[in-house]
Image: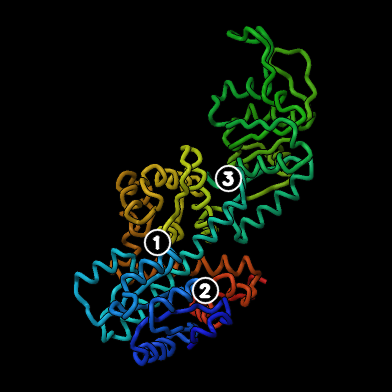
Amino acid sequence: MLDQQTISNHAPEEPILLIVDDEQDFSRGLSRLIQGNFPELQTVTVDSGRKALAILAKSQPQLLITDLRMPEMSGMQLISEALQAQPGLSIVVLSGFGTIELAVQALQAGAYDFLTKPVEPSLLFRVIRKGLERARLLEENNRLRQIVIRQGTQDELVGTGREIQRVRKTIAAIAQSEYTVLINGESGTGKELAAKLIHRSGPRATKPFVTVDCPSIPENLLESELFGYVRGAFTGADRDHKGLFAAADGGTLHLDEIGDIGLPVQAKLLRCLQSGEVRPIGANKSIQVDVRVIASTNRDLVAALQERSFREDLFYRLNVLSLTMPPLRERLEDVPLLATHMLRCACRESGEEAEKEISPEVLQWLSQRPWPGNVRELQNIMRRLSVFCNENRIDMDLVAMVITEHPEAVSSHPLGSEGIGQFSLDYKKAKAQVIDTFTRSYVKKLLSETHGNISEAARISGLSRVALQKILSRLDVQADQYR
């Protein structure tokens, strides 16, 4: 147990619980009881609200437990002033006067929970555990916002997990070469963004970057769009059209979803890649072009080769360098950061100046979805939440409203209609599953960031080393795998 004099020497990675009660024997006994169940938690006891505010002015406890009836300053006044000093502080009222009116008043003032004396230890421990988790999530939320601000614009690969770090390193290496690139990945994983970053990071960055969505152009028009045509080549060709290869001369041409183009265009594309020349439709000579080609697809081109729907020689011409974009379900640790970034972008898109935040409960909900639509699905949901958010905070009530408006947003959620048979219908078990999934994703991201350094991970997370090791042991997560 810490006293007021030694609080300034307290190790910053150890969570602090501040107990405020004018009955000092009670507060000291409460401190011993709590530390017996939370050995990683340091407690500070003071006998007045003024002393509590003095501590809040120079440190940041994760949790505050206060009595209501105290001399000099009441518990209600302390709640108000403590939240002004630290808006995210979790405050639990523990009072011998447990009326419904007082409980409502305390909760309206901003208290996190309300307990009555004498308190059942198991109930007290559960509330403390929830309060500490809330404090950690709020701190993580603030950290995510700061990372988003540092990472900059929308055209960036946002994330800190192992998979996205692999993608960044691959892009950096590919960008320095002139070879053709094949980007594989499911729809919505960011293949076009990866293509842009390869172009922007390479020697052609100041030259044109041209993207063509191959399936969006009818087969009979795709050839003329890619290679161009001359006047009179066909009915309606009343002028010369240079085509996308010529438009990208000196730069990069991104052929998006190349797996969906037909065999005739594949043959002409192969000749272009082999010779570095294009022949516009109706022309009697070819034109030399200097274009780096980046192709992307959500199809399994190896299977397409076996089905003879994609040319083998074209595949090997394109697949000189390759990059696979991971689905979002394989990088769930990045979801909180991505969601925060996308909310910020959505607010900018709609011209909103006020910054909005995401509640820890919503971040938990987002972090355990399977995301069949990948990053694009997350982006759509964050845009919807931004539109319907009339306040500056996105909470689960707003999520419930958006889900009602857009049932497809939760069609794959464990609590949704399709997945409910696989998810516990018991509230406590369902909640435990959600928290367990979030905690697992969080510690994996934490270990990835710190390369398996337990001490550094504990410092960043705000947990003690012992507490973090207990979590890793419970989840059977090995720190050695991240070194």
Closer to the eye: label 1 or 2: 2
Category of crowding for the residue at label 3, using alpha-carbon neighbours closer than 10 angstroms: few (below 14), some (14–19), many (at least 20): many
Residue 105, image quadrant = bottom left
Instruction: Give the class, few, some or many, for how many residues have Cα within 10 Å of label 1's Cα (few <14, many ≥20).
Output: some
Does the CB distance between marks 3 and 1 fall below 8 Å? no
Horizontally, residue 1 falls left or right of residue 254, namely left
User: Dot 2: within a 10 Å radius of its alpha carbon, few (fewer than 14), some, or many (20 or more) residues?
Assistant: some
**Label of residue 59 in the image:** 2
Q: Can residue 19 be seen in this snapshot?
A: yes
SS class, disc 1: helix
> Looking at the image, is 54 positioned above or below residue 195?
below
* Image position of 385 with respect to 280: above or below: below
- Sequence-wise, the earlier of marks 3 and 1 is 3
Callout 3: helix, strand or loop? loop
Cα–Cα span, label 1 and label 2 = 26 Å
Residue toward you, 27 or 276: 27
Q: Is residue 231 left or right of residue 249?
A: left
Q: Residue at the spot x=69%, y=18% of the render?
A: 242
Q: CA distance from mark 2 to mark 3?
A: 42 Å
| The C terminus: image quadrant | bottom right
Q: Which dot marks residue 190?
A: 3
Residue 391, placed above or below residue 25: above
Q: How is the image coloured?
A: rainbow
How far apart marks 3 and 1 lie (CA) works out to 26 Å
Per the image, the residue denoted by label 1 is 361
Q: Amino acid at mark 2?
A: Ser
Image mark for residue 455: none
The residue located at (50%, 65%) in the rendering is 139
- Which amino acid type is shown beneath numbered disc 1? Glu
Element type at marker 2?
Answer: loop
The tag earlier along the polypeptide, 2 or 3, is 2
Residue 31, image x, y percentages = 41, 88
